[in-house]
Amino acid sequence: MKKFINNNDDFLKESLTGFGKAHSDIINVNLDPSFVSRKNKTKDGKVSLISGGGSGHEPMHGGFVGHGMLDAACPGFVFSAPTPDQMQAAAEHVDSGAGVLFIVKNYSGDIMNFQMGAEMYSGKNDSIVTNDDVAVEDSTFTTGRRGVAATVLVEKIVGSLAEHSGSLEECKKLGEKVNKNAGTMGVAFTSCTVPAAGKPTFDIGDDEMEFGVGIHGEPGRKREKIQPSKTIVGNILEAILDNLKPEKNEKNLLFVNGMGGTPLTELYLVYEDACQILQSKGVQVTKSLVGNYCTSLEMQGASITLLKCDDEILKHWDSPVHTAAMRWGM
Amino acid sequence: MKKFINNNDDFLKESLTGFGKAHSDIINVNLDPSFVSRKNKTKDGKVSLISGGGSGHEPMHGGFVGHGMLDAACPGFVFSAPTPDQMQAAAEHVDSGAGVLFIVKNYSGDIMNFQMGAEMYSGKNDSIVTNDDVAVEDSTFTTGRRGVAATVLVEKIVGSLAEHSGSLEECKKLGEKVNKNAGTMGVAFTSCTVPAAGKPTFDIGDDEMEFGVGIHGEPGRKREKIQPSKTIVGNILEAILDNLKPEKNEKNLLFVNGMGGTPLTELYLVYEDACQILQSKGVQVTKSLVGNYCTSLEMQGASITLLKCDDEILKHWDSPVHTAAMRWGM
Amino acid sequence: MSVSFLISQAKGIQKVIDENSAEIEVLDQKIGDGDHIFNIQRGLKLVVELEDSIKDLPLAKALNMIAMKVLSGIGGSSGALFGTFFMTMAKSPDLDKDVDFNKACEMIISGIKAMKERGKADVGEKTMMDVLIPVSEKLNELKNESEFKSGLNEVIKIAEERMLSTKDMLATKGRASFLGERAKGHIDPGARSSQLIIDTICKSVINN
Amino acid sequence: MSVSFLISQAKGIQKVIDENSAEIEVLDQKIGDGDHIFNIQRGLKLVVELEDSIKDLPLAKALNMIAMKVLSGIGGSSGALFGTFFMTMAKSPDLDKDVDFNKACEMIISGIKAMKERGKADVGEKTMMDVLIPVSEKLNELKNESEFKSGLNEVIKIAEERMLSTKDMLATKGRASFLGERAKGHIDPGARSSQLIIDTICKSVINN
Ligand SMILES: Nc1ncnc2c1ncn2[C@@H]1O[C@H](COP(=O)(O)OP(=O)(O)O)[C@@H](O)[C@H]1O
Ligand SMILES: Nc1ncnc2c1ncn2[C@@H]1O[C@H](COP(=O)(O)OP(=O)(O)O)[C@@H](O)[C@H]1O
Ligand SMILES: [Mg+2]
Ligand SMILES: [Mg+2]
Ligand SMILES: [Mg+2]
Ligand SMILES: [Mg+2]
């Protein structure tokens, strides 16, 4: 295993501690139970947003704690949902009286642990579940779709509404709208390596890719030969457009997300391919985000998210944000 | 080769075009000759900063064009210095009358091409050469040290001075101070793959690392067995401290830079290890930067840069910056 | 059931899980995210390490401490589910009285029932519940019998059959549910670890 | 020297470089950054593609267009150096008159001199100059001889010897200079490509 690591047991603790030191102007890191919270407590009466999930997707979610986005993030072990005591402690720490909204990705471990955390927390709270991954079809035979990169967009946009005095109900409603308006699909060229495992999660041929991969290296739609970027991007967009069916006059945010091991140059090339394909289909791209935001350790690959935007969404996307990993306007 | 690519000839053009579209609020991309420049031309009388170099180190340098940092960046082919006509065209495009400062990394190709560009440009100009890599000893037998990650810090800090009406001479002087005050060393776990080559630049064993690697995958000090992060970080810092010899009461900026393929979690762990080691040696860490800023395609690895800071440097580090890859205060 | 029984079971289970760790690891890599074995091993280690703190405590208190450890120390689906299991066990009435086989069965049955509610998974959805629900039903039959040891052999058999039966199921709960047809052909990792746990406990009870 | 001579040389060189591309690629990977072969190949392709635009131009104009193509199309050390070479050639006096062997030698000599000034590298520093400077010195001896073809055989030999001599040098210029002792044992990629270029041109002149 090729990682900067001292020993597996301390991997997360050490990384979180370093994160805390590097961004001590924005956040605090609490260990045991571990959660990241804003350096400056949120103002009274603002709804608090808490997200979390297994580690290995950095900068999600700890990198999104700060003004205009999350109030706290609860990191689990690598690819394991965090535990209820983390959510409870984080909620108690950040709630300013207006209630807590939990933002949860749709995995059974996350759902169950957040539920238990919510039950253990005595204050007013509610949750939203993101499930933007169109790779795996929604059907009566499954628990639904996975929550992946659009979670970043939900956190940014709802974070802004919360900052602008949105109520718990309004925040939940906006979050659900953003989630419903978003579709994502990813592809992986290489596997990731969970530190505890010490070896790659899956084997993949030198000329193969996993189409529709999950952010934990879970298998996707199919294993295929690598194709030119434009073909890959075209196939991803087809799946997303099938699902979202944006109107011609609708504005969209195009989000190209790296899985961790793919250089920016390639992500921008994917962005360009996507722009061209969307333009040829008459789909407007109004906002953009390109970079590593919802990763899968060192996996090489990328996901594309399309978000249909109305004026409310656009306004909250543009508003100032000041976190370790996303910052503008302040 | 596992990359998002359509064909090698168009790789850079497509990526640059995507970059231009994704950040059209900040920058313009000119093709043929290719350079990235600010969307809003710099104000009259401000010194213009132009950097550039082979591509493959993104976000450096195009991601650093914008308010408070560069005025233009000239990207060469992957790992090949850009050509003089790019520098000439960029200079003509951005010069607002106060002259142009070229920021060049110390490689013979970069030096020669920037020199020719400067000769071809008729306006007032000067250049600084960064050479912060302590991996390769400075001696009469070599052209000196390589310019690596500290170039990012030079661009940020001098960029601020230029924004604050520093003259060409003052900008050059500050840039040289920052470069002299900085030391960097890197380590690689895996090779990078130049798109044109289609295969890794070097072979490396599953349990090996290249200690003191260059940002093009050039060999460094030695090939070693992978060690715990703390040992690696300790060895890197020893080389840097030997060179910089910071005073006990001096303030320092600690910059942990990813080579492209290493996840943030590990970079923060490296940051934590470095903080602990520096503390034990009585070296103060006052400012921090952690992330992928000066990369080597998809290489797994990291470099550490220490920059000794006086008040002037600190002030210009903190001042607002608004580029695609570095943004704060606005 | 006593605190020392719990501790010795945890140790026994830890040994068996460690012996089968490679297999379980691969199962969650095939149809999940690969962390199940580490979650289970971390949980067992934490419980075994509790020995000194709980060995002299009353059963209810000990179960409660185990529940908190499991809940806060594991994470993932298994952490929530096994945490729920122990929390429910800890809340059983009359734990200050002797806990005989009948009472132990009732506690386990209620624990599994709570897991079922927490995860909303029933038999046939390719999860650990495919093992645990039939085991709980069998225990319900056995709990009043005095000659329960032979019955436990049947529990062992049921657990194994049901574990194997997950192989050809489509998953509808948990991470494997995202795979559709591709989940078929692999045993569910949680079903395998649960079966090993059941197997170990039953054999230990039978042999004592 | 004529425009058609330049074009046919470029084509001949392109063929030879392509044949040896794997070797040159590895050399720059060993002691440089791996791009030398692509820089050279890109440059040759661009020059060969110029054929239609330059074939009817006067020599000075053609050389100037080649210089601009090389300078703006290659990049890296080799782009700057070969660009300098052609720019200097293009500035030679009396290009509208016939360019005989003597004159051609003088142009090449002045081109190499300009490269030396640009790169500040002399013989012994493990660069292409280890090949080009001795070649230029030999051409200086030969330029006035009428029986120059046998002399060109010596040029071929000198280029090869000097290329091989870079193998055990410490590098002090270019990227290999950062390697210290580790650069030893590998031929300099620029020396190898330059030697192949010299070799190709000389052989073609000898055989015509
Ligand atoms: N909703 C559920 N109900 C019951 N068991 C479940 C449920 N979801 C997942 N499981 C079980 O959990 C196992 C995976 O556990 P683990 O890997 O520890 O957590 P995660 O799925 O969060 O990565 C699956 O193999 C399955 O047996
Ligand atoms: N200062 C210099 N003077 C002469 N030749 C040089 C100099 N620096 C490098 N070279 C030559 O350039 C070759 C490398 O060229 P290339 O790979 O195209 O550019 P780069 O070194 O910029 O990657 C080296 O092998 C060497 O022969
Ligand atoms: Mg998990
Ligand atoms: Mg180069
Ligand atoms: Mg799992
Ligand atoms: Mg090179």
Image: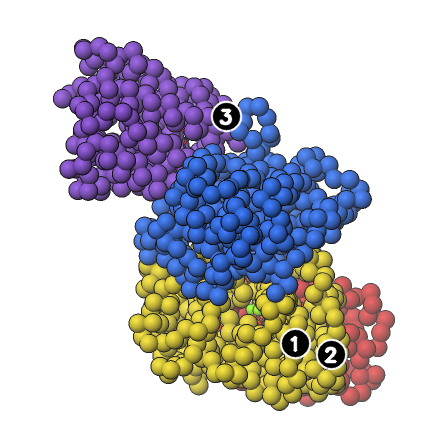
Chain colours: A yellow, B blue, C red, D purple
Q: Amino acid at mark 2?
A: Lys
SS of the residue under disc 2 = loop
> Which marked residue is nearer to the observer: mark 3 or mark 1?
3
SS of the residue under disc 3 = loop
Q: Residue at x 26, y 33 (%)?
A: D63
Pointer 1 residue: A50
Packing grade of label 1 (10 A; few <14, some 14-19, many >=20) is many
- Alpha carbon of mark 3 to alpha carbon of mark 1: how far? 57 Å
Dot 2 or dot 1: first in sequence order is 2
Relative side of A24 to C141, left or right: right
SS of the residue under disc 1 = strand
Q: Nearer the viewer, residue B219 or B172?
A: B172
Q: Amino acid at mark 1?
A: Ile
Residue D55 visible in the shown view: yes
Disc 3 + disc 1, Cβ < 8 Å: no
Q: Amino acid at mark 3?
A: Thr
Q: Residue at x 13, y 22 (%)?
A: D208
- Alpha carbon of mark 2 to alpha carbon of mark 1: how far? 15 Å
Labels 2, 1: one chain: yes
Specify the subunit that label 1 lies on: A
Residue B114 rendering spot, x and y as whole percentages: 46, 39
Disc 2 + disc 3, Cβ < 8 Å: no
Specify whether tag 1 is near ligand 1 (CB below 8 Å): no
Pointer 3 residue: D172
Labels 3, 1: one chain: no
Specify whether tag 3 is near ligand 2 (CB below 8 Å): no
Q: Residue at x 31, y 75 (%)?
A: A281
Please state, as top left, top right, bottom left or bottom right, where the C terminus of chain B lies in the image: bottom right
